[in-house]
């Protein structure tokens, strides 16, 4: 049986001068993701975070202390919405 866990990780997204965006995290070392849009950057950051956490658990390493197991709490969040006019 496969156990699925959900973690909450804070990321910081910055706009790049040359275009696109980059995401980093103080919660999990090594998380760097770059994309053309904020949405794409967030999706890539999720994939990178998942792979990093899987690596921690596969090697029996402790997770960084800032990573929180999700409590399924729904919060007020802002999401990017791209609209072409």
Image (cartoon, rainbow, N blue to C red):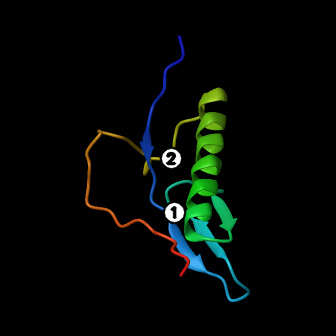
Q: Outermost residue toward the front?
A: 85
Residue 66: image x %, image y %?
A: 43, 51
Mark on residue 5?
Answer: none
Q: Secondary structure at mark 1?
A: loop
Q: Quadrant of residue 55?
A: top right
Q: Secondary structure at mark 2?
A: loop
**Crowdedness near tag 1: few (<14), some (14–19) or many (≥20) residues, C-alpha within 10 Å:** some
Q: Does residue 29 appear in this view?
A: no
Residue 18 vertical position relative to residue 1 in the rendered view, above or below? below
**Crowdedness near tag 2: few (<14), some (14–19) or many (≥20) residues, C-alpha within 10 Å:** few
Q: Outermost residue toward the top?
A: 1
Q: Residue at x 74, y 87 (%)?
A: 18
Q: Does residue 79 appear in this view?
A: yes
Residue 71 vertical position relative to residue 4 in the rendered view, above or below? below
Q: Closest to the observer: 34 or 10?
A: 34
Q: Outermost residue toward the right?
A: 18
Q: Earlier in the sequence, mark 2 or mark 1?
A: 1
Residue 28: image x %, image y %?
A: 55, 53
Residue 82: image x %, image y %?
A: 52, 72
Q: Is residue 77 left or right of residue 52?
A: left
Return the residue at label 2.
64
Q: Closest to the observer: 60 or 5?
A: 5
Q: Residue at x 56, y 69 (%)?
A: 38
Q: Residue at x 62, y 34 (%)?
A: 54
Q: Is residue 48 left or right of residue 2?
A: right
Return the residue at label 1.
26
Q: Closest to the observer: 76 or 51?
A: 76
């Amino acid at each position: 049986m496969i156990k699925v866990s959900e973690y909450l990780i804070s990321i910081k997204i910055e706009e790049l001068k040359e275009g696109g965006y980059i995401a980093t995290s103080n919660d999990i070392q090594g998380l760097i993701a770059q994309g053309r849009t904020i949405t794409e950057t967030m999706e890539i950051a999720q994939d990178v975070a998942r792979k990093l956490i899987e690596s921690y658990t596969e090697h029996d390493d402790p997770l960084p202390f800032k990573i929180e197991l999700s409590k399924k709490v729904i919060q007020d969040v802002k999401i990017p919405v791209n609209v072409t006019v």
